[in-house]
Every structure is written in structure tokens, then in C-alpha cells.
Amino acid sequence: MKPVSLSVISSFLLVTTTFGATLDTQPLQSALIVYNGAVALVHESRHLHVNSGDKQIVYTGVANTIETDSVNVAFPSGIVLNSQQFRYDKLTRSKLLEAHIGKTVKVKVLQRPETFETITATLLSHEGELCMVSTSQGEIMSVPSAQVLFSAIPGELMTKPSLVWNIETTKTLNATMSLDYLIGNISWKSDYILNLGNDDANLSGWITIDNRSGKAFNNTKLHVLAGNINRITHAQPRFKAMMANETAANPAVTHVAHEGYHFYSIPFPVTLANNEKTQIKFIDIQNLHVNRRYDVTLSNPAYLHGEREHSVNQYIHIDGVNVPLPTGVVRTYTRSNNHTILLGETHMPPLAKKRPLDLRLGDNFDLKVSETILQRDDDKRYFQASLRYSITNSSNHDKEVELRIPFPNQKKNSIDTTAPYTVKKGNLVSFTIAVPANGSNRFEVSFRGKR
């Protein structure tokens, strides 16, 4: 494609004016950094040709969600930038008519029933569905606007979102310009697949880019930043230089930790169509050691009356992975009798590297816990309750279940039981109870505390 100027509004439309300065339609460099909060930073550099005396440079094809006050443009020496405009004329018949007032148009005129003749006329005005035109014979006539034909798109109409820079220059230049700006309506998220074996698992992660910005990005360098920023600065080239070096050595998605954020870089050019979602695999970790874990949070004994039965949560526990993981949904699958089964979905918060991870799968079908009041002896200031806890395991495997009981850890409160326990943060008394396959276990506890 030939270089773009104000006269080239679209690759398939004629225009009638030119302003001289031209930009290559394809960028020399293109990069996109997508942040949380549906915002992204666009970076482009293009070859620029400016003639001495040119007054405008038109940069077509910016996103229509551009934040115009974020534009950071760098022109070569010799160009003085006076002002900037954002122009985007969605093409309508009304706009075409307005732009053709005083210009020559073609008009279909009805000569006899079902027979039209095309004549040349000058468009004088338009209002609603009617236009006034002047023919070459000097006749003034009114015609329906639908019968006015156009042979060109006037140069003052910008049919693509464009930045117009009003400049001064006394030099003819062939150089490179660079541009950074923020856009909206583009977001990213991460999702994970955990394929679970007996005591190991494989974890894969995917980045999904949802581009609704009004601009397509072709063969661009893509980066995403995990973390919630207050507002980004334009000090991004330092990130990109670091990422470029790492990518050259390892053709996988890499990341750099910087100022409390994690900056992920895709090592290959990515094409993002407008109004489409694109998924990119960014981690693939094999043979993670996993454990099963089971727990249940029970009633505060001060408020329990009678008997209650509870389901037991089941978790997959991973001691940690060697890379930080952005927040996302983890879907856990396993294989059983040659079928793939979804075990559960878990929302995972941002996870620093080597931090333990617990993924709740759901309620375990074979484990039940009941709590029963055996005796209460309450007065106005204190409650005293004796409870029996029973755990039933209907599976063919031995299990350990953690029972968490809310009970304030205060000086005058007391717990009397033969079962070992610990007190955790949040005033939780924790019992870890072994339950044999197809069996049960029970124990009793007496609580005394302030009401």
C-alpha cells in the first residue's frame, strides 16, 4: 500500500485533497501493553515524509477509544507541533451531503415513468430527505437526497479514527516518528487448567485478550501487566528491552517483576482483531506434587442447639509453583473409566511464586460431619456446653478431616477434651481427625465461655 496522507482516508475510497505529509501505513514497530481495568498502552513507530511548508500530519487508524490527553508523540528535529485534533467521521448520507455543498454531484432525474436520467449538478443545500441542486443550464430544482450520487469522499471527512497534528516545518524530512497513547475497552484475564492424577498434576495457563477498542492490531508485540495500577507512565521501553533479551533466549512467555507488578511478554507477534477474543498459552507446568485436603467449619457452641449435619469441603493442595500466577479461574479435571471429569472450578487470587495453593473442588460426597449437644448448663454470664462430633467416611480410602470450630480465645474460656487441637487465627479451634475407609470416628468436647 502507498504512503498515507490526508488524501488517503480509506484504502478503497477516493478523496479530493492532499496535505503533502505522508506516513507509511504499516508501522516499523508495534507493541501493546494490556492492563487490568480495560485499558492498554499502544506504542507505534512509523516512517514519516514531510515536505518543507507542510502544515498537517494525519495519523489514520488509531483506536476510537483513544484517551486523547494521553497521546505522547515524538517527531524528528525540524518539526514544530502546534496543536492536535482527534477526527472520526462515521460516514452517513447527511455528512456526505453536507461535505458536497457547493460541489458537483450526479443526480438521477425521473424523465418519464420508471425511466431515470443521470445529470450533473451543483449541490446547493439539503434538509431532511430533500436537496436543492443547480443544473448546468442554471435551473434550480428539488430532488430526493437518495437520488444524489457521489463520485468521491471529500478529504475533510475522516472515515477512520485519526489524529491530526498541525505543524510547522521548513525542512524536507524522511525520518521516523513514535507514538504512545492509552485506549479503552480492551481487557485481559488468565485462566488455568489443572489435569489431576493420583498424586501429581499438570497446570496450564491461558491469557485471554478481549479487544473491543475499535482498532485491530496486526503482528504486534503483546504484553500484559498483572496488578492494579493507579496510572501508568510512559517509561515502558525499559520493560520491553528486558523482555526482548529474555525472549530471545527462551521462546516461552516470560515475565519481569517490577515495582510490585508482574509484566508478562508474549515472545511471538500476535494479531488481535477488533471485537474478538484471542487466547494465548502462557504457562505449562508438569508433574506438580499435590495432596488432597478436607475441612469443615462447624457451629459456634454458644449458639448450637440440638444436632446439625455438615458437608465437607474437598481441596487440592499444591505446595507452590516457581512462577507468579495472575488471578484467574482454575478448572480441575481428572480421568475416570476413560472419561474426563470436571472436578470443580476455583477463583484463584494473585499468587506469588512458591506460595501454597488450595483449590476448593466442592463438597465431598462420602464425608459427613455431625455435631450434637449432649448437655448445656448456661447462666447469665457464661455458657457451658458438651458436644459430640461424629465423622463418617463412606469411601474406600482412609481420610483426614480438619474440623474448625469458632470459639473465642479468651482467658476465662476453656476447652476440655481428650482429642488434640490447635487454636488458629480468627478464633478457630482446629481438630484433625483420621477416619478409616468405610468407617467413622467420634469425640467429645466441653466448652465454657462468656455469653
Image (spheres, grey):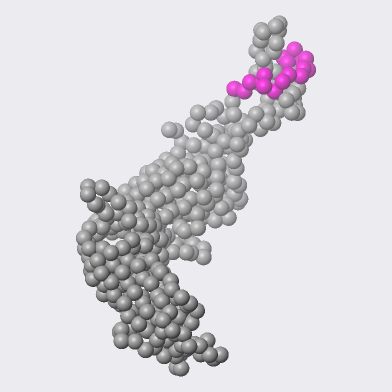
Q: Which residue is drawn at 52% across and 50% down?
A: 185
Residue 429 on image: x %, y %: 39, 81
| In this rendering, position of residue 84 left or right of residue 212 | right
Number of callouts in the render?
A: 0
Asked if residue 55 shows in the view, the reply is no
Where residue 82 appears, x then y in whole percent? 60, 51
The residue lying at 51 percent from left, 46 percent from top is: 213
| Residue 140 belongs to magenta span | yes
Residue located at (55% from left, 27% from top): 14
Q: Residue at x 23, y 67 (%)?
A: 437
Q: In this view, does 97 lie to the left or right of 141?
A: left
Tell me if residue 184 comes above or below residue 257 in the rendering: above
Q: Which of 170 and 187 is in front in this view?
A: 187
Instruction: Give the image location of residue 321, x and y in percent.
Output: 28, 66
The residue lying toward the viewer, choosing from 387 and 302, is 387
| Residue 439 in sight here | yes
Q: Give the range drawn in magenta.
A: 135-151
